[in-house]
Image: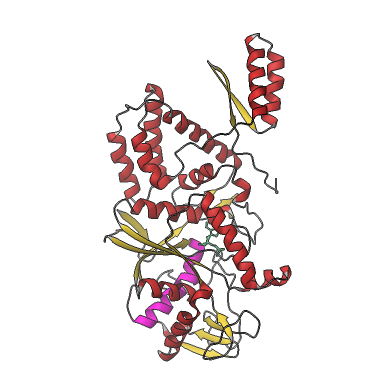
C-alpha cells in the first residue's frame, strides 16, 4: 500500500512486515476535544488496517510534565504529577469509548528521565547543545539539515507554539530547550542541576529506547510538523548521524469549526464527552473525510452521518446473499491508496444501496472491515419502558385514526430524545444520537 510522506511530499510504498510506529500523544491537563479524537481515531484505524497484513508495534507517549500542567496544578492546588495522572485516566476512558485499542504501549515522559538526560549529554558531547542560565539548548545552526522535514526554520500561523522557549541568551531564536533548570517541583537531578525535560526530547528518548535509532512511521496532526517534529529530526539525526530518522512522516489535517482549528486556546472546542452519546457516530464522522484534509464539525453534518448509520443498520438486518466481490476489490484499492476513506466509503454505500434495494446483505464483509472501522456494527438500543408505553399508546391512536392525539405523543417522545419511524408494523422508536448541547450555540 501507498502512504503519503510529509518529508518527501510523495506517496511511497510502505514495505516491510514489521512496522514500528510512534504517535505524539496528549498533554494531560484537561478534557480531550474532538480534534484530538480525530487524530487518535485515525491512527487507531490506520494501525488496525495495517495489521491485516503486517505486524505493527504502536507506541504513544503521554506528556505528563509541561508548563500547562504545572500552571493548572497550581490553580487546582494539587501536585502536577497528581493532576497529570487524573487527566490521563480521563483520556484513557475517552479512548476506550471510541474503541481506540490499537496502541501497544502508552509511555509517560516522566518514566524516561534517564533516557532524556542521556540524549541531552550526547548532544552536548557532539557539539549540538550548549548551556545558558536556565538550561541546555539545542543549537539549530549546527544541524545543517534543519528544515528538511517542514521546508522552513521559522514559526508560522497554525504551528503548535505553546511551548516555545524564551531566553535572550539563546544563540538564535529557533534554538529550543532540551533540559530546563528549575527549583520548582517536579524536578529531577541531572548533571546540570535540578530540572525537567524540554518539550521535544521526550519523544526521541522514548522512541530510541523501544525502536532504536530509526523507525518506520511517526504520526501526529499537522500543527506538530514545525517546530516539534523538525526538532525531533534534529535531535535524533545529530545523535546517530543517520538519515532519515523516520521513513514516513504522517500528519492528520485539523478538525475545524467554521474553518478554524478546534483548540483549547480558541475556546471553540467540543469535548469528546459532549458528543459521546454515540461514539460509533463520532468515529464514523471522523473517518468520513480523508485524513489529510481539514474536516469541519457541524451538527448538520453529524445528522447526515447519523442517517448513513441508519442505512448501514438496515443493511445488517437483511438475510445474506449479496454478491460483493467487485465492490470489495475497489474498496481495498481505495484504502491501499493513502487510506482514501471517502472513496472507500462511497463504494461501501453503493454496495449498501444495492443490498437495501434487493433486501440482501453481506455480513461477513461488514464484519471483516469493521475490524478497523469499528463503527459498522449497530449499537444495542435500550429503549426505556416509559417510551415503549408511549409508543404503544400512539400506535393505538393511529389505528383508530386519532391523528392529533398520536401527534401529541410523538412530540412528547421527541422531547425525550427519541424519534419515531412509521413502518407497516407501526411506529418504531430509536434514540436520537446527535443531540448534544454545544455551549456556544
Ligand atoms: P495536545 O494535547 O494539544 O498536545 O494534542 C494532542 C494531539 O492532538 C496532537 O497530535 C495534536 O496535533 C492533535 N490535535 C490537536 N488539535 C487538533 C485538531 N483540531 N484537529 C486534529 N488534531 C488535533
Q: Residue 336 placed where, x, y %?
A: 32, 49
Report the residue at 66% width, 18% height from top. 394
Q: Is 27 in front, or is 164?
A: 27
Q: Is residue 1 visible?
A: yes
Answer above or below: position of 386 versus 300: above
Q: Can residue 170 be seen in the rendering of this structure?
A: no
Residue lying furthest front in this view?
Answer: 385
At a point 57% along the width and 83% down the height, the residue shown is 188
The percent coordinates of residue 315 (x first, y second) are 42, 29
* Display coloring: secondary structure
Q: Is residue 342 left or right of residue 299?
A: left
56 relative to 187 in the view: left or right: left
Q: Which quadrant is the C terminus positioned in?
A: top right
* Between 371 and 437, the one nearer to me in the picture: 371
Give the total of numbered labels: 0
Is residue 17 rendered magenta in the image? no
Which residues are drawn in magenta?
A: 222-243
Can you name the residue that lies furthest to the top here? 400
Image: 419 above or below 16: above
Magenta stretch prevailing secondary structure = helix
- What is the quadrant of residue 292 in the picture? bottom left
Residue 302 at x, y percent in the picture: 56, 40
Q: Residue 38 placed where, x, y %?
A: 51, 53
Residue 133 placement, left or right of 245: right
| Ligand 1, image quadrant it occupies | bottom right
Magenta-colored stretch includes residue 227: yes
Up the image or down, 312 lies above or below 398; here it is below
Amino acid at each position: 500500500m501507498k502512504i503519503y510522506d510529509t518529508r518527501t511530499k510523495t506517496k511511497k510504498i510502505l514495505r516491510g512486515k514489521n512496522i514500528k510506529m510512534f504517535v505524539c500523544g496528549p498533554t494531560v491537563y484537561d478534557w480531550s476535544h474532538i480534534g484530538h479524537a480525530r487524530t487518535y481515531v485515525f491512527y487507531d484505524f490506520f494501525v488496525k488496517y495495517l495489521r491485516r497484513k503486517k505486524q505493527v508495534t504502536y507506541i504513544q507517549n503521554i506528556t505528563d510534565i509541561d508548563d500547562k500542567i504545572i500552571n493548572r496544578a497550581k490553580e487546582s492546588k494539587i501536585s502536577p504529577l497528581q493532576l497529570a495522572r487524573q487527566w490521563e485516566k480521563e483520556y484513557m476512558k475517552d479512548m476506550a469509548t471510541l474503541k481506540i485499542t490499537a496502541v501497544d504501549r502508552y509511555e509517560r515522559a516522566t518514566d524516561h528521565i534517564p533516557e532524556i538526560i542521556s540524549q541531552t549529554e550526547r548532544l552536548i558531547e557532539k557539539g549540538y547543545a550548549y548551556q545558558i542560565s536556565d538550561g541546555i539548548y539545542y543549537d539549530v545552526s549546527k544541524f545543517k539539515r534543519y528544515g528538511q522535514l517542514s521546508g522552513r526554520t521559522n514559526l508560522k500561523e497554525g504551528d503548535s507554539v505553546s511551548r516555545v522557549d524564551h531566553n535572550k541568551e539563546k544563540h538564535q531564536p529557533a534554538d529550543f530547550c532540551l533540559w530546563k533548570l528549575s527549583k520548582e517541583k517536579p524536578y529531577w537531578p541531572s548533571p546540570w542541576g535540578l530540572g525537567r525535560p524540554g518539550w521535544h526530547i521526550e519523544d526521541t528518548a522514548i522512541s530510541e529506547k523501544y525502536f532504536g535509532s530509526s523507525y518506520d512511521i511517526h504520526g501526529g496532526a499537522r500543527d506538530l510538523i514545525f517546530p516539534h517534529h523538525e526538532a525531533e529530526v534534529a535531535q535524533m539525526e545529530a545523535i546517530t548521524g543517520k538519515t532519515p530518522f523516520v521513513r514516513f512522516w504522517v500528519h492528520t489535517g485539523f478538525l475545524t469549526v467554521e474553518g478554524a482549528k478546534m483548540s483549547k486556546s480558541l475556546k471553540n472546542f467540543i469535548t469528546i464527552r459532549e458528543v459521546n452519546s454515540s461514539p460509533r457516530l463520532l468515529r464514523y464522522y471522523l473517518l468520513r473525510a480523508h485524513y489529510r484534509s481539514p474536516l469541519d464539525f457541524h451538527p448538520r453534518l453529524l445528522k447526515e452521518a447519523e442517517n448513513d448509520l441508519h442505512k448501514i443498520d438496515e443493511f445488517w438486518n437483511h438475510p445474506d446473499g449479496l454478491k460483493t466481490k467487485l465492490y470489495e476489490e475497489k474498496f481495498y484499492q481505495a484504502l491501499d491508496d493513502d487510506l482514501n476513506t471517502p472513496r472507500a466509503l462511497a463504494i461501501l454505500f453503493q454496495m449498501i444501496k444495492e443490498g437495501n434495494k434487493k433486501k440482501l446483505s453481506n455480513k461477513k464483509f461488514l464484519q471483516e472491515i469493521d475490524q478497523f472501522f469499528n463503527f459498522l456494527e449497530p449499537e444495542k438500543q435500550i429503549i426505556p419502558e416509559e417510551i415503549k408505553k408511549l409508543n404503544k399508546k400512539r400506535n393505538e391512536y393511529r389505528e383508530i385514526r386519532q391523528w392529533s392525539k398520536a401527534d401529541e405523543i410523538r412530540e412528547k417522545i421527541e422531547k425525550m430524545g427519541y424519534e419515531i419511524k412509521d413502518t407497516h408494523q407501526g411506529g418504531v422508536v430509536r434514540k436520537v444520537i446527535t443531540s448534544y448541547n454545544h455551549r456556544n450555540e
